[in-house]
Image (tube, grey):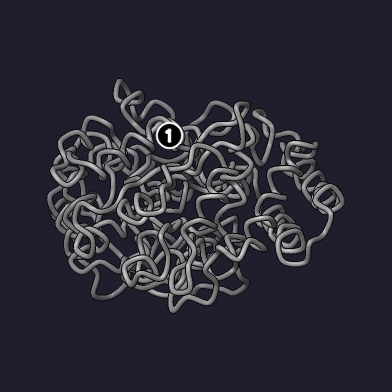
Amino acid sequence: MADTHPTTAFGRRSFLGLAGGALGAGVLAACGDNTGRSDGSSTSGGSLRLSQWYHQYGEEGTQQAVEGYAKAYPGASVTVQWNPGDYDQKVASALLTDGGPDIFEFGNGPSIDMIQGGQVVDMSGILGGAESDFTRSLVQRMTYKGKLYAVPQVTDMQLLVYRKSLLQAAGVNPPATVDELITAAKKLTSDKVKGLFAGNDGGIGVLGGPMLWAAGQDYLSDDQTQMGFDDTRGAAALSRLRTLFTSNALLLGAPADWSDPSAFTQGLCAMQWTGLWTLPVIEKAFPGDYGVMAWPALDAQGKPSVPVGAYGSCVSAKTRNVDAAKGFVKWLWVDQTAKQLDFAQSFGFHIPARQSVAAKADKLKNPPASDAVKLVNENGHAQTPLLWTPKCATAFSDGLTHIVKDGADPKAEIATMKTTIDAELKRVNG
């Protein structure tokens, strides 16, 4: 899903606002040796040396936690490198050198170009008997041609939050279809309150996928060889965002964007599309007076949905110790369930990637948090397919902008998108 998500205290979810962003140009200076270590890194005990990279998380204490996990590993001396700035660019550049990491995290797993370029290691079988316990949509997202290339670390999601009291006062039930949502947003709108907030761009950056899923469609076909929405239902689904944009029920120009709950907690809107990570703030503002739900279905042929995403732990193909690196990934992200629970719950508000671990999370045992977990398991979609490249995302975003803001013909815009998307699919599918 274009990055409308700030890299602030919500840093763990910065990639979840992506429709597929292009990696920038530039070169990362090679580190001092083939372990990818840098001065000042934290190193665990052991004789075998491995390096592990993370992006800079915004939640306080996260760096110390992952350094502690690495130190506890008995099988190797693991160096943790914390990477502020443009992490995706650093990783992409480092994978081309001998100075990159052995193990690294990447948003939704490695890109298709990393996989096809032989830059990451096949990790098939690493989940063992626990595979069915992991969030299914994320495992599928990190799999290419039957081979797994990353292990999900923690699950984040987007969802719709609503004020129960405001809906009750307006005689509105939580909407079951997109048209009901638009009608509800209009009824909830007053001089001081708008019915819905989905970002200052009118939802262009985050609602494209949910609208396609609402119609029973997707960005790409199941085999990822064809565009998935170039028909009348795709056009109808995307046109609803134009209807919403022109309804006068949509909050635009809020002090902060969709990933921040302030528009909702300040009473500027009755419903907001946002992320799971905002629930603690909302709970403090409106204890017991809010609910969560998926983006509703377009009609009986569609289904409600929520986008889910996760950083995946990957192994570089340039590592000197493939088995050792895979062993550490398995130890931390498959076997060490207590550490997985700690990572998900002690630093921010997230869902463990394994269902059995999520069931142990105290913060997720009661509604509406437990409702959110149910939405992930029953209505979760990986935010974009693996073969949805940055060029595909840009074409989609440009076309959706024309539809929503300019009132352009959806069928014509979809045809324009198709030219770029088909070319990209031909490139990556050979």
Q: Secondary structure at mark 1?
A: loop
Q: Residue at x 79, y 62 (%)?
A: 407
Q: Quadrant of the N terminus?
A: bottom right
Q: Position of residue 12 (x, y in %)?
A: 35, 60
Q: Amino acid at mark 1?
A: Met
Q: Residue at x 34, y 39 (%)?
A: 326
Q: Position of residue 23 (x, y in %)?
A: 60, 64
Q: Residue at x 41, y 30 (%)?
A: 378
Compare residues 375 and 46 and report the one nearer the observer: 375
Compare residues 247 and 298 and report the one nearer the observer: 247
Q: Is residue 328 left or right of residue 151?
A: left
Looking at the image, is 408 positioned above or below residue 331?
below
Q: Is residue 389 left or right of residue 304?
A: right
Pointer 1: what residue? Answer: 123
Judge the density around disc 1: few (<14), some (14-19), many (≥20) Cα neighbours within 10 Å.
many
Residue 13, quarter of picture? bottom left
Residue 263 visible in image: yes
Residue 104, quarter of picture? bottom left
Compare residues 389 and 328 and report the one nearer the observer: 389
